[in-house]
Amino acid sequence: MQSRLATSAVNVDIERNNANANKARADGEATYIRETGAAKSAEVEAVGLAKAKAYKAQVEALAGSDGSSQRDYRTRRRKGQPAVRAGSAWSWR
C-alpha cells in the first residue's frame, strides 16, 4: 500500500512538471507570435505611410499642390486648345 502511495505521489509530481513545461512552452510561443506580429504590423504601417507620401509628392509634382495646373489644363482643353506638359508647367499651343 505504501509503495503505491509513493508511486502515485511521484506520478502526480511528474504530471505537474509536464504541465508546467507545457505552459512555459506555450507562453514562449505566444510571446514570439505577439512580438513578431507587432514588428510586421509596424513594417506594414511604415510601408503604407511611405507609399502615401510618395503618391502625394507625385500628385503635387504633376498638378501643383493647389490643383491650379489641373484646373488650367481642363479649362484650356474645354476651349479646344491642345496642351503639352513641358517640365513642371503646361505648355499651350
Image: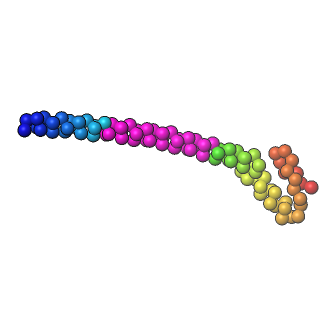
**Residue 12 percent location from the top left of the image:** 19, 39
Point out the image quarter for the C terminus.
Answer: bottom right
Q: At 56% across and 44% down in the image, what residue appears?
A: 44
Q: At 86% across and 64% down in the image, what residue appears?
A: 79
The part of the chain drawn in magenta is 22-50
**Residue 41 percent location from the top left of the image:** 51, 43
Point out the image quarter for the N terminus.
Answer: top left
Res. 13 image quadrant: top left
Q: Is residue 70 magenta?
A: no
Q: Which residue lies furthest to the left in this view?
A: 1
Q: At 89% across and 60% down in the image, what residue appears?
A: 81
Q: Which of 18 and 25 is in front in this view?
A: 18
**Residue 25 percent location from the top left of the image:** 36, 38
Q: Is residue 35 magenta?
A: yes
Chief secondary structure of the magenta portion: helix
Q: Which of 70 and 31 is in front in this view?
A: 31
Q: Nearer the viewer, residue 72 or 30?
A: 30
Q: At 15% across and 36% down in the image, what residue appears?
A: 7
Res. 33 image quadrant: top left
**Residue 68 percent location from the top left of the image:** 76, 53
